[in-house]
Image (cartoon, coloured by chain):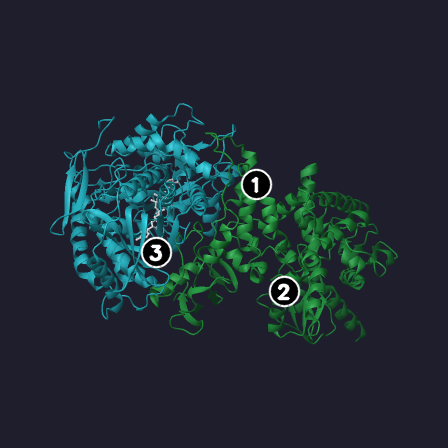
Chain colours: A cyan, B green
Amino acid sequence: MEYKTIVCDVLVVGAGGAGCRAAIEASNHNLDVIMLSKELLGKAHTSMAEGGINVALGNVDPKDDPATHFKDTVVGGNYINNQELVEILVDNATSRVYDLEEMGAVFDRTPEGKIAQRPFGKQSWRRTAYASDRTGSEIMVTLVEAIRKSSVRVFDEMFATKLLVQDGRIAGVTAIDMKYGDYLVFRAKAVVMATGGAGRIYKVTSNAQLDVGDGYAMAYEAGCEMIDMEMIQFHPTGMTRPESAKGRLVTEAVRGEGGILLNSEGERFMKNYYPQVMELAGRDQVARSIMTEVIEGRGSPTGGAYLSISHLPKRIVEFRLESMIEQFGDAGVDIREEPMEVSPTCHHFMGGISIDTDAQASIPGLFASGECMGGLHGGNRLGGNALCDTQVFGALSGENAAKFAKEHSLTGFDREVAKQEFDRVEAMLQRKDGISPADAREELNNLMWSKVQIFRNEEDLEYAVKELKRIQKEVVPKIKVDVPIKRFNPGWHQAIEFAHMVTTARMVAETAYMRKGSRGAHYRVDADPDDKGYYNIVIRKGDDGEMDLKRKDLVITKIQPP
Amino acid sequence: MAKKFKTTVQRYNPDMDDSPYFEDFEVEYEPGMTVLDALLYIQDKYDSSLAFRWECRGGQCGSCAIKVNGTARISCRTKVNPDKDILLEPLDKMPIIKDLVVDMAQVTYRIRRIRPYVARDKPPQRPEIIQAEEIEKLREIRKCIECSACLSNCPIVAETWDYPGPMIIRQLARLQLDPRDVEDRVSMALDEAVYTCTTCKMCEDICPKNIKIPSLAVELLRAKAVEAGYPLAAGQQGFIDSINKTGRSVPEKDAPLLQTTETEEFLVDTPQGRVAFFTGCLIDYRMQDTGRALIEVLNRNNVDVIVPKEQWCCASPAFRTGDVHTGKAAAVRVTEIFEEVAEKYDLDEVVVACAGCGKTLREDHRPIIEEMRGEPPKFKVYDLAEYLLDVIGEENMVKPKGRIEMKITYHEPCHLGRGQGVVDQPIELLKMVPGVEYIEDPYKNRCCGAGGGVRAGLRDLSMKIATTKKEYIEKTGADMVTTECPFCTIQIKDILKGTPIETKYIPDLLAESYRKGDKK
Ligand SMILES: Cc1cc2nc3c(=O)[nH]c(=O)nc-3n(C[C@H](O)[C@H](O)[C@H](O)COP(=O)(O)OP(=O)(O)OC[C@H]3O[C@@H](n4cnc5c(N)ncnc54)[C@H](O)[C@@H]3O)c2cc1C
């Protein structure tokens, strides 16, 4: 297949919070930086984040400090976080948030004119900085303003399909121009992966269309070490209706601002599970509590719980939760007056590409940040820590990619590999018989939602692994695009994504199957009591092409697991 | 059986098709369904290659703007009405890549031209102290998700990229309001043609974040320009000088209505209501017959009409062009006059004949008065059609009887429909007239190009917008276009010169039908 080659110093794959931040940082080093994304600039998933960004400024609770942020993050992560990475997070959060402000971000203020902070689950102090409940949008808009000031070359609607590795070093990526269908190779001295999560492998998710796990699959296929892939956060509060809005996030800020959870009997049931912290228990804990109520017959008509904020003054709700008013208004619910119906939704991937303290992956020259990177959040991510991750590690990955690019010359790449990759995606267009991506995706979504979910067990997971292997072998090679055109063809894009989704799903299922005890978001109803779970699971592609899973010791710097 | 509705989608693949064409799809309705859901349904069931953009499906990313039944909106927050078929087209102005996906490059270039980021002359202190009050207004217009729907709907952008459009002028205001930004955004706004906006409010109406761009961005930047001493266009300043001197925005020509009416009181025998009539400058000085027609229509419906002899301009031209000082003075004066009348005649309803004045009384005067004295004006403002239908009620109206055998369409004045929420009532009045065949213009709510000081200050541009309007009107095949605003009437009459299409103010048409009915 014919393709064109574009060369740069630093290539950033992804234009969410992490990708934009990395690109800005790298471009500050007088380098030629290219940033790719599947959507238009500024439309990345990060724009959907609502509640806020964690930073121990101590503006409202002066006792807060990075050390407490560290402790909360590690305890919240069920002690399996990479503590070296957590240290980087908490030590740099303040500077990165001030960077945002310097670029033009408009956070809400305290009476003294400092950045205001709200309480979020499992945090000792009010730590989460915010702009109403559209914090992600505020950050995204700010980064876009900064990108427009920079020399970064933005190639949006550009779909990266495979990482190119040459002699053990990163060489670039193959990509498809979604607008016109052209094949392109982007060569770079260093590459930053900032491809976000993969909520879309589940039927019910809060994630944007783009979050299908391309980055996880590409990194795995290239030989990167992946970590904590079994750790998937189900956010306790997703919308339950209308059907088309199912899974859409109801921000944790609702509970942060004082929202209470009720069952069908009007009982504030969290007191039966976590009486000390009630609604602000960990996300996994609240999610399981809601599901237990539903399973035991005390759920709402649409299979969830009630979340009520109507006891708060309308003024407060209107000022601090404007997006929620709008979101539920569309569904015909006035949250100032009536309770919302909520149930868990697939929200966040704690796991991902494993990195060192330079944000470098196991392939030299490849860096990772944001949701596609793993190890930082351990078994459970605290609300507000993901946005913080995008900024701290986005900047770190950009900076180190720039350093790497300065110290290395451009490497070559294997043209045969590129050609084969383009042949592979071209074949989907030419195939006469086969399976449509829509059907295939539905099967995958249902499988993951029913078998690799909040409550896990041996039998389900074994079945899921078996099924995923079958899908990988039998369905993936048969995926066929209905209409064989290359110009902006969503059917084709979905077909290419499907292979990535299956690889990602398999990593989740395999690691979940391997972990026999409960830990963090990974909850086994048949947990082996001897498996305390104080280890990480890492995956690599073995020499035989199969998934190679290993237990790995925790990286501990300060806090020993109990 | 689930209900089905027809969705017509514009298709186009320039590689293969000579020109765009339409394709129909049957879509099964589900409660709560949005236009995006309908598109996803089509993609899933019929054609996976149908191209459209979307990401978050929750109104937060701004990817999915398309034209729905002629008006650009984000599809994920636009509800489907299963009883109506829908027509989906790509955004206007932007070149099509495929189907509903357009090339946004022009928008990007246009944004970059305004240096769209907080410019600083030195690195800030850390932490930076910013008071909540300093960012209150900024916070409002910061909600923009850059969906670009407003650019597609903007009548100015449709004519020229000299104006960057609502979304981008909003970004300028966002930067001008930011205490940290050091650029001179006011002179930049002038360079970016901030005076070309007609304040038609189309952008505000479809904004998924309900950002009041005309007032919070355009009029704000204009006010800052006036404050900084930039002169208005000669045509605009003339209006304002005249207001300050005479209380009327235009010079006297024929005998003014208020001078020729012998009395303030137009009373009926058994009144079912009593209103004061705010004439506005053009009815008083230019369209006296329309004023008389309006009084007649109200009287015929058994409504007492009080026409205060001393009236004052609402100062709409000042508000629209940024002369806040003149605007405030007028708000106080008008409120005084009508509160006095209200008290003297024991009434609390004021009928305004002009869409621009009505909008100004409601949207500009009211908050100013409320802020000044903690209490809004003591009277309510109505458009004629709104008063007759919503207050008097159709069942209590005395219907016009004279036949007018004509095909009539309607131009919705921007400051009536979007300015005051009066949309259906004027059309209902039209339909009451025997013989009238009402013809719906799908673009009835598009600006005629007169407002916002554009007719006064930038006649060429104003006429370009009007010419586009003319094309819409001609397409309806109507013999007559009616409207409810003197300004629109003058503008549309102007542009329709040389065509057989008549232009009429609704009170005039009603009065004509009443009078014809008497003769029979
Ligand atoms: C509804 C919601 C609310 C949230 N609220 C909060 C909150 O309040 N606080 C908080 O801390 N966290 C929150 N999160 C989590 C947080 O938003 C995400 O973890 C974070 O935004 C991820 O940012 P990112 O930059 O890593 O990836 P994303 O923003 O997901 O961006 C990924 C980028 O990678 C690109 N990409 C992916 N694959 C490819 C490919 N194959 N080729 C080219 N480009 C590709 C995409 O196009 C995109 O540009 C929330 C998440 C959700 C879903």
Q: Residue A61 occupies which quadrant of the picture?
A: top left
Return the residue found at the far top: A63
Q: Nearer the viewer, residue B388 or B314?
A: B314
Which disc number belongs to residue A158?
Answer: 3
| Residue where numbered disc 1 is placed | B177
Q: How many residues crowd mark 1 within 10 Å: few (<14), some (14–19), many (20+)?
A: many
In the picture provided, is B513 more to the left or to the right than A327? right
Determine the secondary structure under disc 1: helix
The image shows residue A555 at horizontal and vertical percentages of 21, 32
- Total labels: the figure holds 3
Q: In whole angstroms, how far apart are the C-alphas of marks 1 and 3?
A: 35 Å
**Separation of residues labelled 1 and 2 (CA atoms):** 32 Å
Q: Earlier in the sequence, mark 1 or mark 2?
A: 1
Residue at 15%, 35% (x, y): give it: A531
Q: Quadrant of the N terminus of chain B?
A: bottom left
Could you tell whether B73 is left or right of B405 in the image?
left
Callout 1 touching callout 3 (CB < 8 Å): no
Q: Secondary structure at mark 3?
A: strand
Q: Which residue is mark 2?
A: B464
Q: Nearer the viewer, residue A358 or A276?
A: A358
